Amino acid sequence: MKNISDNEIIDSVLSGNGSDYSLIIERYKDRAFSLLSNMLKNKLDAEEALQDSFIKAFRSLNAFKKESKFSTWFYKIVYNTGLTVATNKKRKLQIQMNSIDDVYNLKDEDNETYAASENAKDYIIKMVDKLPVRNALVLILFYMDNLSLKEISEILNISLVNTKVLLHRSRNLLRELLLKHNYQEEIL
């Protein structure tokens, strides 16, 4: 089944074999969920956004022109769905905060430092989660999902030059955050 290309699966689905779409779901669900989890920081929201993304992609399959890879087209849907969910959550939170007279001071969790016993990869992922969404997203897509800069630029709907700049700035932000938390190993 892994030898079947995305385009072959899509052609099969478009010719009436809707059940073949499950192959696309199986192929992309884990990476897309990881992407959404990092964007939304909430497992339930990520699951809902993932389901919405697959539904949107299914309904729009006939609009897929096959000019780029399916993964790039699909991740763009996932990214936009995640942004929509995040924006809606932010609006809802602002409405709730406006109705509260006292704003509580939350404990600053940025004071944690790297413990020698902690897994370095898990620690770095935790630090990436603290970055702004776009910065975290470009690092995840480039380093974890191994997408090219061209594919990332298509997903984020920005130029290739801006994608390179965003990746560079994201690396620097992560490096600063790691140094701030006394993580001294060379990682980037």
Image (cartoon, helix red, strand yellow):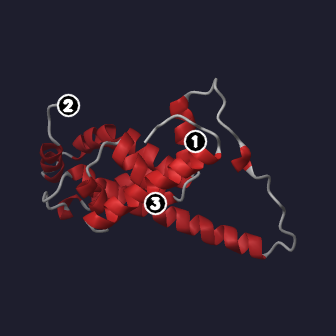
Tell whether 161 sits left or right of 143: left
Is residue 115 shown above or below 150? above
> Which of the two marks, 1 or 2, is nearer to us in this view?
1
Q: Quadrant of residue 52?
A: bottom left
Distance from Cα at disc 3 to Cα at disc 1: 15 Å
Q: Residue at x 57, y 44 (%)?
A: 178
Classify the position of the C terminus by image quarter. top left
Image point (36%, 62%), residue name: 165
Residue type pointed to by label 2: Lys
The three-letter amino acid code for the residue at tag 1 is Lys
Q: Percent x, y for residue 175? A: 51, 48
Q: Which mark is residue 2?
A: 2
Identify the amino acid type marked 3: Arg
Q: Is residue 20 left or right of residue 116?
A: left
Q: How many neighbours does mark 1 have within 10 angstroms: few (below 14), some (14-19), or many (20 or more)?
A: few
State the separation of the CA atoms marked 2 and 3.
Answer: 31 Å
Q: In this orientation, which residue lies closer to the viewer: 184 or 52? A: 184
Q: Which is nearer the eye, 87 or 126?
A: 126
Farthest top residue in view: 117
Residue drawn at 79 percent across, 56 percent down:
106
Above or below for 3 versus 106 = above
Q: Which of disc 1 and disc 3 is earlier in sequence?
A: 1
From the top left corner, tell me how far across and down residue 158 is, in percent.
31, 68
Q: Secondary structure at mark 1?
A: helix
Q: Is residue 35 visible?
A: yes
Q: Which residue is mark 3?
A: 134
Q: Which residue is mark 1?
A: 126
Measure how far apart labels 1 and 2 are at the Cα level.
Answer: 32 Å
